[in-house]
Image (cartoon, coloured by chain):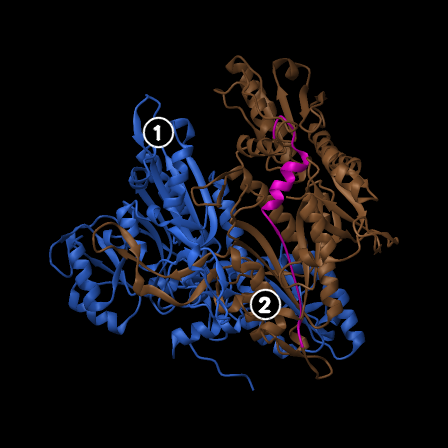
Chain colours: A brown, B blue
Amino acid sequence: MAQEYTKRADDYSKWYNEIVDRADLAEHSDVKGCMVIKPYGYAIWEKMKDALDVKFKETGHSNAYFPLFIPKSYLSKEASHVDGFAKECAVVTHYRLKNAEDGSGVIVDPDAKLEEELIVRPTSETIIWNSYKKWIQSYRDLPILINQWANVVRWEMRTRLFLRTTEFLWQEGHTAHATKQEAIEETEQMLEVYADFAEDFMAMPVIRGRKTESERFAGALDTYCIEAMMQDGKALQAGTSHFLGQNFAKAFDVKFTDNTGKLDYVWATSWGVSTRLIGALIMTHSDDDGLVLPPALAPIQVVIIPIFKTEEEQRLIDEKVNALTKEMRKIGISVKYDNDSIKRPGWKFAEYEAKGVPVRVAIGPRDLANNQAEVVRRDTKEKTTLGLDGFAVNIKELLDSIQSNLLEKAKTFRSDNTHEVDTYDEFKRRLKSDSGFFLAHWDGTTETEAKIKEETKATIRCIPLETKEVAGVCMYSGKPSKGRVIFAKAY
Amino acid sequence: MAQEYTKRADDYSKWYNEIVDRADLAEHSDVKGCMVIKPYGYAIWEKMKDALDVKFKETGHSNAYFPLFIPKSYLSKEASHVDGFAKECAVVTHYRLKNAEDGSGVIVDPDAKLEEELIVRPTSETIIWNSYKKWIQSYRDLPILINQWANVVRWEMRTRLFLRTTEFLWQEGHTAHATKQEAIEETEQMLEVYADFAEDFMAMPVIRGRKTESERFAGALDTYCIEAMMQDGKALQAGTSHFLGQNFAKAFDVKFTDNTGKLDYVWATSWGVSTRLIGALIMTHSDDDGLVLPPALAPIQVVIIPIFKTEEEQRLIDEKVNALTKEMRKIGISVKYDNDSIKRPGWKFAEYEAKGVPVRVAIGPRDLANNQAEVVRRDTKEKTTLGLDGFAVNIKELLDSIQSNLLEKAKTFRSDNTHEVDTYDEFKRRLKSDSGFFLAHWDGTTETEAKIKEETKATIRCIPLETKEVAGVCMYSGKPSKGRVIFAKAY
């Protein structure tokens, strides 16, 4: 009998944990808040990295690497930055262990105390701008367009695999510019890069927007974000791009001579996405039977499972499948032939379903005789019979169709769960009955935002870039509003 | 006037630092012992990573990611392992900062002290075997073939860019096997992967060998290594592959049921190479004029520099070069066209020479008229004139020839600087007059090895795998020896 798994409708959070476990993506480690990303989960991250890295390079960025450790005094140089990160820092205070004199084991050597404590980077603006200071003298040294793939640590009390972990993997872009305008354009460009990646690769529609003041990155003048809707209607911030103004240049005294000979502080941006995207991917597409992956990010796009009784049958199927896989790989399809003879086909079907492999192909002796195969797509579970002539090309088309279907489905879901509300009563009522995004007028003040959050737990996810300015009145205060913003409960 | 740089013959160590600086590869950060890997240096690391990653995957390994932090008690579980790493550990003791009550700034919050200190991983055997314990029950769960690309920290007092830094980037493979034989085969296979990479990509010949007991990895039963000779005759350990026996399985109680139902401890290997390889690459090929890169790892393989006076000349050259670069990129050549009109050609020539770009092409109006270009190879500085018909294919051949020439040159250098010595007096004398590898008989004892090290600073780099066993007498003790080992001073 198949094991009973939790359904999304019954307990979304438990369902999520089971999906991660069944697909063998990651697990909690014994180190509080840190996860182990298992090979299949890491393979998805590699696909994401590769696609993003190409986009970063196409837009002129290079990768580099800066130290893991940040001296405490650096973190303190930008006032709001340290406020934002001080409460969740891993602090290195010593550099040596030694054997305890009483033989009880290994202890921290008190003689090896650091003069200045080091912080394990929660983000790298400070250590990077300390380097940029040495690299920038004139406008000819600008722009600097650097990205770093790295691990970062933010001490989290409540963690969830991929969504919120103490250590996570990410990329952080850090750019330096001669003009404010150029820095803003960079911030916006990288938001577009993220949005395109989310839609084209993750098949996850996103709202491009700006954060309110209270939700901005610590040290930014403006934070742009992409927000996605998960299947439970909650919002997930999937990527951010920050216009940092001259804050870090001022904190680290980074000035440059412009082309008129005038001295000015350098303009900055930073932008990042993390392994959190894997959590977003899971919660956008997966179903009660397991993970569902868009073909563009699936480590295995097609699995082929032979159905046979005799060795001779197996031999004949092997032969045909080897030709098919060769044909498929030639046009860039990632295919796995699982001809393990111990595990039964039914077990394999369930396994690859749980792992979200977009297309499953089964071939038995009768299929072979009819020059065809049984093809099941993971997204709709639709089963068809496909002729083996021109198989690779037809499978490629099917993968494309799955990719676009997943995006369309997610778009429809989002649109079905986006509601315009005009009064605070309606908002509170519908927050209980419906989930999703609520488009409402807001007076633009931090006070109103804070009160709504306190009373409803919903927050302003973003001020959408696409929204046309339409005058209205704030649902909470009745004061004038310039346009609707997105309220939602969020991860 | 060109700046005067240090020559290898005058001060090899200073020359090395200048090469790194002139090629803009890396710099020391303000964080003690940690380096900043700058874009051009990181681009070389990316080429290395990509090539190695393909080899790891071809040999059946998958990437995964384990936590940065290791609980102090884990590190202590394998006795010799903790002995080897305890003295150079970064220790996290707290997880929060706070504002000092006297307003003096940010301090470590004493209330946020960890119950158990965390060590920033110096290597990941312990944290990984703690996971493997959960993953392995039966022989059907084996082998586990995992690799991790990560940063690690070993607190170093004396650091040198790439060669020895407190934080460095590396990969660490960690495999688990059902039999001793299979684990040894894996250890040997990965040594071959490293040796092939060193020779085929880095154009750096290496000796495959085994470490003596005193030079083994802390926790290994056997450490295999590849050793390369730098231009100053010193040895550099470029990669290691460890047969760990059942040490970590025993320390973490990882047992499995074999196919006869018997319970046994799992067999292990680990293997790694690091950003140290970039230091090895520099010291194998570079000359007094700057970096020399083998084409297989050069971020830019070919640079094209236009020589022009008028805009019309520039336009005509641009047009031709655009066609040439397209042709070259089509066959996989990485080419940069530097048509910056502010910097002079002479400045560019020196710049790309310092950066080690394997081939420099210069094209002026007269070249254009003659349908040819001036081509200079970086390794020999040989200048030739090459016709523009079939240009890409000819350049490709030139790159291949540079790659093999660099390897041959390095092989010749190594062979010229490898000496057989039979008496300790001769050894000591030649250590002063010659540099390089000294092949000598050794009695196999740790005592003799230690005495020779103490008296001469030369160490046994490895017991070469290729050496045939030839009886002899130890140059130090006069006791019987099974064959010659390699003594050298080392990085």
Region of the chain picked out in magenta, as a range: A265-290
Task: Determine the residue positioned at 32% across, 55% down.
Answer: B85
Q: Which residue is mark 2?
A: A79
Q: Is B12 drawn above or below residue A332 in the view shown? A: below
Q: CA distance from mark 1 to mark 2?
A: 54 Å
In the displayed orientation, state which residue is furthest to the left.
B478
Q: Which residue is mark 1?
A: B256
Q: Quadrant of residue A322?
A: top right
From the viewer's perspective, tell me whether residue B103 is left or right of residue B235. Answer: right
Q: Is A464 drawn above or below residue A289 in the view shown? A: below
Could you say whether the residue bearing mark 2 is in a helix, strand or loop? helix
Residue nearer the viewer, A115 or B338: A115
Disc 1 residue type (three-letter): Phe
Please provide percent x and percent y for residue A349.
59, 22
Which subunit holds the residue at mark 1?
A: B
Task: Determine the residue positioned at 68% across, 41% down.
Answer: A202
